[in-house]
Image (cartoon, rainbow, N blue to C red):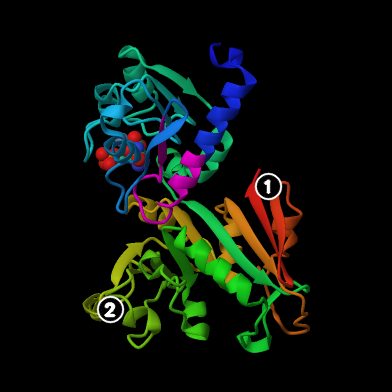
């Protein structure tokens, strides 16, 4: 094909601009749902004349932002974009039409958009207008960056990231759920950054009762990036005095409860700013919310990427149900010892670390702790 015959120099140039587009796209992560966080760069004669990324709330899309910056100079230029430009009249007009109208000569797109409204038609529209389209540069990285969008479109559920912070003896808390500092300060900021890049975070009611967490992103300058907080609260035991409810008016709080939980409690929590969402319970023991139904409900509301933060029972249920796509395993240096709470409740941690279902993608030291990332194979 045309692209295979390009010179090494031209390919290196393309790679550099696509990597910039990917970096720009990541700026929107956690803030563009239900839309993917796309990045776009416009280049003419080797000079960048426009940069754009999907704006908070999902619109405008990345391409019109970059085109507006380039203005008239876009005529004859190359557009690098991390996802196929859209071809449908959604809440915004088709990006493909805007690209044609601006006179772009060549589009380099990382990957096709699986959205059935687009699915190749964006590229077809560009080609029909005489634009040269090169598809597939950095496709693997783009698939990773858009994993939430792909999973939501294809499987009607969010991409699920499980975060675990464990001791060398695979425990997350001391006897009686007494909290211990398993990992250090640097890991804490890293987790807050991870939260900011996800659309929603989820915990079980046990964690809320034990820790009274707030689950917001508290990094300097990033207050506005807190994800939706989701609590599995089958019997609707959430206290009106929890930090979660107190902050429900500024950061969304969604309580997933069984259809049988009491109406008056739901009304009171609703009045305090929480959203109560009812899902079916499992028919087989142990009693619990149907996790696939929970995920489908979240995807239906637009969530593309979900961070599961605990505790051990919630983590093990997601693993056992085969609903975990990615694991961030932080490991501290100090043993917790006998009686400590096991990371995955009844499951051994090797259900992830030794399972053929997961492959290790990356590993790094963070001060005295390690982070290992696993991906569904
Ligand atoms: C693009 N560029 O930056 C993004 C795209 O409801 P709408 O009109 O905003 O369209 C949403 C769909 O557009 C979304 O599901 C996905 O397929 C695509 N997202 N497309 O050309 C972008 N964010
Ligand atoms: Zn678009």
Residue 366: percent from left, percent from top: 69, 67
Residue 297: percent from left, percent from top: 36, 55
Secondary structure state at the residue bearing disc 2? helix
Asked whether the viewer can see residue 237, the reply is no
| 321 left or right of 25 in image | right
Secondary structure state at the residue bearing disc 1? loop
Q: Quadrant of residue 247?
A: bottom left
- Label 1 beta carbon within 8 A of ligand 1: no
Asked whether the viewer can see residue 248, the reply is yes
The number of discs equals: 2
Residue of label 2: 269
Q: Earlier in the sequence, mark 2 or mark 1?
A: 2
> Does residue 147 lie above or below 238 as drawn?
above
Magenta stretch bounds? 20-43
Residue 356: percent from left, percent from top: 73, 46
Alpha carbon separation for disc pair 2 and 1: 39 Å
Q: Characterize the local packing of mark 2: few (<14), some (14-19) or many (20 or more) Cα atoms within 10 angstroms.
A: many
- The quadrant in which the C terminus is found is top right
| 294 left or right of 64 in image | right
Residue 63: percent from left, percent from top: 33, 36
Q: Are marks 2 and 1 in contact (CB under 8 Å)?
A: no
Residue of label 1: 357
Q: Quadrant of residue 102?
A: top left
Residue under the point 44% across and 38% down: 154
Q: Characterize the local packing of mark 1: few (<14), some (14-19) or many (20 or more) Cα atoms within 10 angstroms.
A: some
Residue under the point 32% across and 13% down: 128
> Does residue 250 lie above or below 300 as drawn?
below
> Does residue 277 lie above or below 235 as drawn?
above
**In-front residue for pair 99/157:** 99
């Amino acid at each position: 094909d045309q692209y295979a015959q390009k010179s090494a120099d031209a390919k290196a140039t393309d790679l550099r601009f696509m990597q910039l587009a990917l970096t720009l796209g990541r700026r929107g992560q956690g803030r563009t749902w239900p839309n993917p966080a796309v990045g776009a760069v416009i280049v003419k004669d080797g000079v960048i004349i426009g940069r754009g990324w999907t704006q908070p709330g999902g619109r405008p899309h990345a391409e019109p932002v970059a085109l507006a910056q380039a203005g008239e100079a876009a005529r004859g230029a190359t557009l690098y974009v991390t996802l196929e430009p859209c071809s449908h009249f959604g809440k915004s007009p088709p990006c493909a039409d805007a690209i044609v109208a601006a006179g772009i000569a060549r589009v380099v797109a990382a990957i096709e958009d699986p959205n059935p409204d687009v699915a190749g038609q964006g590229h077809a529209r560009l080609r029909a207008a005489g634009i040269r389209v090169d598809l597939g540069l950095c496709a693997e990285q783009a698939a990773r960056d858009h994993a939430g969008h792909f999973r939501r479109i294809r499987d009607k559920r969010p991409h699920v990231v499980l975060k675990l912070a464990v001791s060398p003896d695979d425990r997350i808390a001391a006897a009686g759920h007494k909290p211990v500092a398993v990992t250090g300060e640097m890991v804490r900021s890293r987790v807050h950054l991870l939260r900011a890049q996800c659309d929603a975070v989820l915990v079980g009611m046990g964690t809320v009762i034990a820790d009274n967490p707030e689950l917001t992103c508290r990094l300097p300058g990033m207050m506005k990036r807190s994800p939706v907080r989701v609590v599995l609260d089958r019997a609707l035991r959430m206290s009106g005095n929890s930090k979660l409810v107190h902050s429900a008016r500024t950061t969304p709080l969604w309580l997933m409860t069984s259809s049988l939980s009491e109406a008056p409690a739901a009304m009171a929590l609703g009045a305090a700013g929480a959203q109560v969402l009812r899902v079916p319970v499992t028919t087989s023991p142990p009693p619990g919310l149907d996790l696939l139904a929970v995920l489908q409900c979240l995807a239906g509301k637009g969530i593309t990427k979900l961070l599961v933060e605990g505790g051990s029972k919630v983590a093990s249920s997601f693993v056992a149900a085969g609903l975990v796509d990615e694991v961030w395993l932080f490991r501290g240096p100090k043993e917790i010892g006998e009686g400590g709470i096991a990371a995955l409740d009844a499951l051994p941690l090797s259900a992830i670390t030794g399972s053929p279902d997961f492959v290790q993608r990356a590993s790094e030291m963070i001060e005295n702790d390690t982070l290992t990332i696993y991906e569904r194979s």
